[in-house]
Amino acid sequence: MTRAVLSLGSNLGDRFAFLQGAVTGLRDHVRAVSPVYETAAWGVEEQPDFLNAIVIVQADDVDEWGWLAKGQALENEAGRVRTLHWGPRTLDVDVVTVDGVTSEHPDLLLPHPGTPERATVLIPWLDVEPDAVLPGHGPIAEVMAGVSVAGVRRRDDLRLEW
Ligand SMILES: Nc1ncnc2c1ncn2[C@@H]1O[C@H](COP(=O)(O)OP(=O)(O)OP(=O)(O)O)[C@@H](O)[C@H]1O
Ligand SMILES: Nc1nc2c(c(=O)[nH]1)N=C(CO)CN2
């Protein structure tokens, strides 16, 4: 059995519908879904704001590569076109962590190396798992203490169904 933390992001088209589509696609495996956050883009800053959320999933028969494949299938279903690195996208699904698994394979780095710097991941993750630990970095509450919360706003008017 594996349990994974997935990060969802969208900043093109009907952003909320793309996040909801991903959660619906994962529904057999979903254990928790965070609130939705409106977030200023990092990386390439001249692009529309993102909606971000975290989903906790669990399954008997899905390993870390299986979670990556499910995420990529959902991105493809959302019509994602790969253009600019860190550029706009209808749907991004990152595998943040998989319990008990670390990986240095470039196609599947675990934990996802961006996590310790990204309030867009840490804030929604804290909402659903306040005691979570990021392997190699410690409790996420402590990691978050060193990260700016600027540009991250909770959207209580948006709620993902699962
Ligand atoms: N933990 C991971 N989760 C998702 N994709 C990963 C992970 N580790 C490595 N990758 C690889 O990253 C590539 C996808 O990169 P993508 O274009 O989505 O990056 P990005 O979302 O723009 O940037 P970032 O990965 O920094 O969030 C894929 O080839 C995938 O195999
Ligand atoms: N706020 C925000 N900015 C981003 C995001 C994201 O999910 N949220 N994802 C990116 C590429 O992975 C690039 N920039």
Image (tube, grey):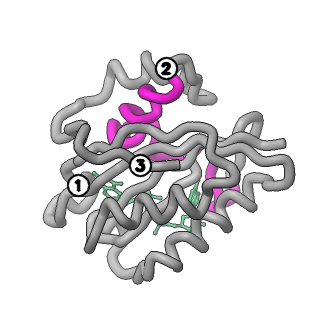
Residue 120 position within the rendered picture, expressed as x and y whole percent measured from the top left: 34, 42
Q: What residue sits 78% from the left and 48% below the top?
A: 59
In the shown orientation, is residue 158 left or right of residue 3?
Answer: left
Residue at mark 2 to residue at mark 3: CA–CA distance: 19 Å
Q: What residue sits 72% from the left and 43% below the top?
A: 58
Q: Quadrant of the N terminus?
A: top right
Mark 3 residue element:
loop
Q: What residue sits 51% from the left and 62% below the top?
A: 22
Which-is-in-front pick, marks 1 and 3? 3
Mark 2 residue element:
loop
Report which residue position mark 3 lands on: 160
Q: Nearer the viewer, residue 48 or 84?
A: 48
Magenta stretch contains residue 83: no
1 and 3 marks in contact (CB < 8 Å): no
Magenta stretch contains residue 120: yes
Report which residue position mark 2 lands on: 130
- Residue 123 location, quadrant: top left
Residue at mark 1 to residue at mark 3: CA–CA distance: 21 Å
